[in-house]
């Protein structure tokens, strides 16, 4: 029951973030839009919808498509938002070739859609965090919410 409640709370927080709550600079972007063309394959090597991790460094890997340009994102950020509402943003992932995504979408421009974020969770409070992938481009911000939750123990 606790896991389901934790998952529900984290998803609600993620949806609130996607809806535009908060006073971060990203929320001031002139054009905000959402996409579902992203996926987190693994968090710390685990592919579950809810992943329990210890504080420290963890690898978050997956893929994201800039659906506005039908190409690999030029910039990608990973935002974690917990129950406190304060976002923790991680930038500059390693770019990974994803020939499987090229094949699925039949688009050669999607080869570099893969990512590996090295995320330091040591400064985060324990609890559940929703994940948002952000693709900023000038005055626009494309966001994608993979259906994954990180629970820091």
Image: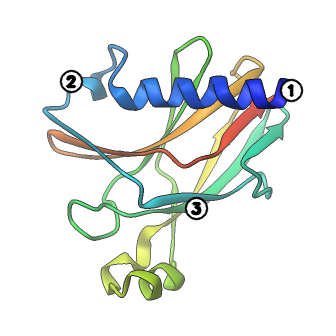
Q: Specify few, some or many for label 1: CA neighbours under 10 Å numbering under 14, 14-19, or 20 or more.
A: few
Q: Which residue is mark 1?
A: 1
Q: Which residue is mark 3?
A: 62
User: For the point 75% across and 58% down, which residue is it?
Assistant: 47
User: For the point 21% across and 24% down, which residue is it?
Assistant: 28
SS label for mark 1: loop
Relative to 128, is 106 on the left or the right? left
Q: Which residue is mark 2?
A: 28
Relative to 115, is 76 on the left or the right? left
Where does the image place residue 12, in percent across and percent down from the top left? 55, 25
- In primary-sequence order, the first of circles 2 and 3 is 2
Q: Specify few, some or many for label 2: CA neighbours under 10 Å numbering under 14, 14-19, or 20 or more.
A: some
The CA distance from mark 2 to mark 3 is 27 Å
Front in this rendered view, residue 56 or 148? 148
Which of label 2 and label 1 is nearer to you?
1
Compared with 115, 49 (above or below) is above
* The N terminus sits in image quarter: top right
The CA distance from mark 1 to mark 3 is 28 Å
Query: Pointers 2 and 1 in contact (CB under 8 A)?
Result: no
Front in this rendered view, residue 41 or 93? 41
User: For the point 59% across and 47% down, which residue is it?
Assistant: 147
Where does the image place residue 26, in percent across and percent down from the top left? 29, 29
Q: Tell me which corner region of the image, top left, top right, bottom left or bottom right, holds residue 33.
A: top left
């Amino acid at each position: 029951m606790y896991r389901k409640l934790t998952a529900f709370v984290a998803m609600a927080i993620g949806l609130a973030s996607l809806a535009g709550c908060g006073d971060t600079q990203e929320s001031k972007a002139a054009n905000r839009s959402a996409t579902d063309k992203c996926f987190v394959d693994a968090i710390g090597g685990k592919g579950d919808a809810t992943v329990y991790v210890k504080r420290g460094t963890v690898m978050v890997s997956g893929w994201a498509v800039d659906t506005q340009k039908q190409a690999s994102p030029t910039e990608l950020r990973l935002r974690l938002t917990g129950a406190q509402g304060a976002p923790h943003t991680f930038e500059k992932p390693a770019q990974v070739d994803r020939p499987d995504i090229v094949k699925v979408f039949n688009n050669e421009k999607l080869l570099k859609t893969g990512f590996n974020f090295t995320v330091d969770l040591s400064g985060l409070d324990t609890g559940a965090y929703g994940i948002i992938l952000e693709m900023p481009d000038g005055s626009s911000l494309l966001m994608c919410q993979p259906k994954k939750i990180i629970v820091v123990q």
